[in-house]
Structures are given as C-alpha cells and as structure tokens.
Image (tube, grey):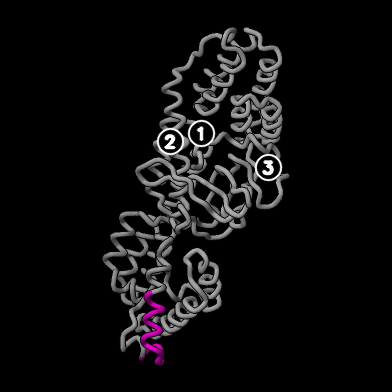
Amino acid sequence: MVRLFLPICLVALGTHALAANVFAPGQLVRVSRGEMMELDGKNFVGAAKGQEFPVIQQDPAGKVVFVPYYKKDGPPVAVTISADAVEAAPPDGWLDLLAGLEAFRHQHYDASREFLARSAQDEKYRPLAAALAPRLQTAATTRSAAALATLRETATQLEKLGYSSLALALDEGTDHLGSATAPATKLNRDDLTKRVATSTRALARTRQAVAMHCLINAREEIRAGLEAEPNRPELKAFQVKVDKDIADAAEYCTNADHYRRLFKGTPHALTALEMGLKLCADDPKLIALKKDMGDAFEEKTAPPVTPAFLTAAGGGDAKALAEGHSLYTNRCTECHDLELVDSRTKDGWEKMVSSMSRRAGLNEAQQARIMDYITAAQKVVEASPEK
C-alpha cells in the first residue's frame, strides 16, 4: 500500500541536482508528454502535457512514479506514471518557502534553512523568507521559551495573512522543539488542520481540472480552496488564468452563435465552437451549442463512413475506413474531445496520432487505420458545399 500523506520534498533538498528521472517524495513534477496513468496495472486516466503532481514515491527500479489522483467524490488514490514522462517542475519561491516550514515541522532543520535561503532568492517571497529564517534558526538552536513564544506569535500572524499551510507547519514544528517550555498554541489547531487539508485537496483537483480544460469545475475548486486558505499563491495564480480563459471561451461561444446564423457561416461557427471547447470543455453554453449543432459538428469532426462519404473521398475500403472511424471516435476521445479534421495538415495529424498512440494504447496497424480515415475525412470536408 502506498502512503498518500507526503511532506514537501524533505528527502532531497536540491531537487535540481537529482539525476534525470529520479524524484524525491514531495517533489513537484510536470508531465512532459501526454501519457496514460495506471491504477493497479490497468489504464486509469490520461495525464495531459504540462499537468503537475507531487511525487508520493518512485518504484525501486525507477521506471514509474506514484502520484496522487483525486476522484470526483472521494479520497485520492495512488496512480503510476512512467518516470520518463515527467520532469522536475521549475523552481518556485513559494514551494521552497512551504518546503522550508514542512522541513521545520519534521525537525529537518538544516534542510529548512536551505529551503528558506533558496526561497529568499525569489523577490516576491524574499521579505517573508528573510523574516522567518532567523526566528526558526534561533528557536532550533536555543529552544528558549522566548524564542518559542515568538514562533507561536509568528504562526498566528501567518494565519491572519491567509497563509494557513505555513501557519500550521510552523505551529506543529514548534511543538517538537519543546513541549514543556513552549507556550500553548494560539491557533484553533483542529479547524486549521481541516482548512489546510481542504485547500491542499482543492489545489490538486484544480490542477486536474485545468489539465482536462474543465475550467468551470476548476473555478469551483479554487473558490473552495481560497475560502479555506485565502492567500494560497498557487490557487490565486490559477484563479487569474482560469477566469481569463473562461471569459475567452464565452467570447468564442458568442461568436459561434453569431456565425451559425449567417449564410454559409457554419464553418466559422464550428471553428469558434471548437476553440471555445478547447479552452473550457465544461462550459454549459458551449456544450448546449455543440448539441444544437450536433450534425454539423459531427460532419466536420468525424463524418460517418457512408456511401456519400466514400464518393466524396474518392473511394476506399469501406470496412477499413469504418474501423478507423471507430478507433478515432472511441479511443481518441478517452482524454479529450475530437477536433475539426481540417484543423491540422496530414503531417500534423500523423504527429498527433503518433504522440497519442502510447497514451491510447494504439498499435501501428491501428494508427494506420486512423490516419487512413482522417485523410479520407479531410477530403470529404474539403468537398463540403459549405467549405
């Protein structure tokens, strides 16, 4: 059983110095290519390029990494992703700051000092890191009642500033320094623990939702997370991006609705609709518009193999093309919606199908069937009267 509780990167301080594809527990990693994640050795869910996860642990052979995945209504499960499909996320001053206090909580004082020094290199977090470092150092060295009282007061200040995760780590770390000499905590520890768990869970679910372009869901998670921890930087950064992309998706929806009412405006409407759904796949207005334009959308994304299709495509093996259509509409929609078949060149589609084949579990013959179908479908769309 893989433990899902993980401190922030306490094992390997300079994670940038780790060997390639070797990751420490708690380290934040980023998916470098689209990849299928597995649960108990079976395909579970796709991970999009750019999606980030904290590492739970890496298997001894180093071939897979265990990361947490939150189901819609339940606790996280430990899933695996190929180690060569992830890379270390870029350095981040906030994560170093949080890691420094997590290290302090777990009595790794040298690591804590180095994390805070690295956080201080980030201009945004330099004042906070510079203020915390000497207080932690003094308390860890002297363990005096005065130093511990200062930490209790600092934890209270952090909580008032909206940094609940920092406050909790600092306050619990103070407990370890001197249960007999430390003054009582000034925080409602039970409430604080629950709120930090809520913000951490919301952050993980936000990352998942953004990776799947489900921005309405992401916005709900961000709201819940910021209610629990009002100043959590990762959630605030996501909030800005998500709000902007939702607004842009709404504009695409307005344009699509406008174009579909114009003479021969359907192709432009479908392009705007596709662009909107790429930004926000769970926008209810875009979903409703896609349903209204269902037949036209299908004809531009995955036209069925009919006698008319074969005529427009200039012939072909009906059975093989139907198999390609089935693979394309079923296997290629496990992680994302279909695109307009004329949105890429043939070379572009070949690169896309090839890059997604591992994630979708497609062999070379199946890839060839899909490409034959897409090539024919492009001819059909090109021959469309509304093209």
The residue type indicated by label 1 comes to Arg
Which residue is at the front of the view, 319 or 132? 319
**Distance CA(mark 2)–CA(mark 1):** 8 Å
The residue identified by callout 1 is: 232
- Residues in magenta? 311-326
Disc with the residue nearer the chain's start (2 vs 3): 3
Rendering coords of residue 375 (x, y %) = 46, 82
Q: Which residue is mark 3?
A: 15
Image coords of residue 139 (percent x, y): 66, 15
Q: Nearer the viewer, mark 3 or mark 1?
A: 3
The secondary structure that most of the magenta stretch takes on is helix
Q: CB under 8 Å between callouts 2 and 1?
A: yes
Whether residue 155 is visible to the viewer of this picture, yes or no, is: yes
Q: Quadrant of residue 205?
A: top left
Left or right of 119? Residue 2 is left
Q: Which residue is mark 2?
A: 225
Judged left or right of residue 322, residue 240 is right
> Which residue shows up at 33% across the image and 79% down it?
304
Mark 3, other Cα within 10 Å: few <14 / some 14–19 / many ≥20:
some
> Going 45% across and 24% down the picture, which residue do you hit?
192
Q: CA distance from mark 3 to mark 1?
A: 23 Å
**Which label is found at residue 278?**
none
> Pointers 2 and 3 in contact (CB under 8 A)?
no
How far apart, in angstroms, are the residues tagged by discs 2 and 3? 27 Å
Check if residue 313 falls in the magenta segment. yes
